[in-house]
Image (cartoon, rainbow, N blue to C red):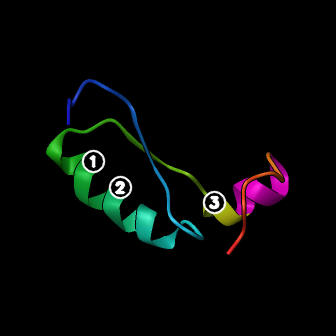
Amino acid sequence: MDKNTPIIVMCHTGVRSAHVCQYLEPLGYDVTNLEGGIEAWSQLVDPSVPRY
């Protein structure tokens, strides 16, 4: 992965992706956690995204 390319990390609820961000950020990656995960994205932004 290119450290200069912004990365959005996501998972079901945003908890695991937050841990990944905590790991990658000190290594110099430009990371952002999708807060609330795919579940929140489906509810708040795009209902066509399947929820599981």
Q: Which mark is residue 21?
A: 2
Left of 15 or right of it: where is 29? left
* Mark 1 to mark 2 CA distance (whole Å): 6 Å
Task: Name the N-terminal-most of marks 3 and 1.
Answer: 1
* Mark 3 to mark 1 CA distance (whole Å): 21 Å
Q: Which mark is residue 25?
A: 1
> Pointers 1 and 2 in contact (CB under 8 A)?
yes
Q: Quadrant of residue 52?
A: bottom right
Amino acid type at image mark 2: Cys
Amino acid type at image mark 3: Ile
Left of 19 or right of it: where is 28? left
Counting from the top left corner in percent of width and height, residue 41 is at: 71, 54
Counting from the top left corner in percent of width and height, residue 36 is at: 65, 63
Q: Nearer the viewer, mark 3 or mark 1?
A: 3
Q: Which residue is mark 3?
A: 38
- The residue most toward the bottom is 52
Q: Nearer the viewer, residue 48 or 36?
A: 48
Provide the residue span drawn in magenta.
Answer: 40-45
Residue neighbourhood size for the residue with mark 1, other residues' Cα within 10 Å, grouped as few (<14), some (14–19), many (≥20)? few
Counting from the top left corner in percent of width and height, residue 7 is at: 38, 38
Q: Residue at x 24, y 59 (%)?
A: 23
The quadrant the N terminus occupies is top left
Amino acid type at image mark 1: Glu
Q: Secondary structure at mark 2?
A: helix
